[in-house]
């Protein structure tokens, strides 16, 4: 009497993908949110490598661009070029 059914593979209607939107909360409107982005996402920004990305993460949260420039220790010239690519 060991009639067990094999586990289902999870293909019971979960293929729409619409419930997966919260996985990319770091990007809104094409901009990267510096308060929620992963190191990998920050690293994709021009001029930001893994070291600068970690500096940004270490000093979170940021209210705005002014606070980012004062807290993050990333050069202001680098951050200037990101103004249109980031959000808070």
Image: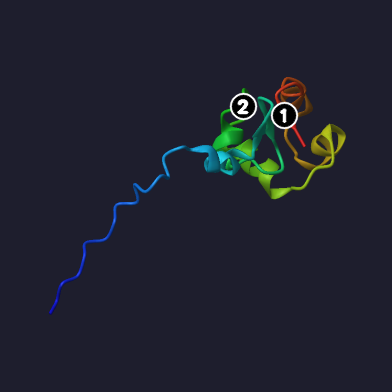
Tag 2 secondary structure: loop
The answer to whether residue 72 is left or right of residue 64 is: left
Measured along the vertical axis of the image, is residue 35 above or below residue 74? below
Residues marked 2 and 1 touching at CB (< 8 Å): yes
Number of callouts: 2
Q: Which residue is mark 1?
A: 86
The answer to whether residue 48 is left or right of residue 40 is: right
Point out the residue furthest to the bottom here.
Answer: 1
In the picture, which quadrant includes the C terminus? Answer: top right
The answer to whether residue 80 is left or right of residue 14 is: right
Q: Quadrant of residue 24?
A: top right
Point out the residue furthest to the right here.
Answer: 66
The answer to whether residue 26 is left or right of residue 69 is: left
Which percent across, then down, holds residue 26? 64, 38
Q: Could you tell me which residue is drawn at 80 percent across and 37 percent down?
A: 68
Which percent across, then down, holds residue 29? 69, 26
């Amino acid at each position: 009497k060991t009639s067990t059914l094999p586990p289902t593979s999870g293909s019971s209607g979960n293929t729409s993908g619409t419930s997966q939107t919260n996985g990319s909360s770091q990007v809104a409107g094409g901009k990267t949110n510096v308060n929620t982005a992963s190191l990998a996402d920050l690293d994709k920004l021009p001029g930001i490598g893994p070291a600068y990305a970690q500096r940004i993460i270490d000093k979170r949260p940021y209210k705005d661009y002014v606070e980012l420039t004062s807290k993050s220790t990333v050069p202001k010239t680098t951050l200037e070029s990101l103004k249109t690519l980031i959000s808070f």
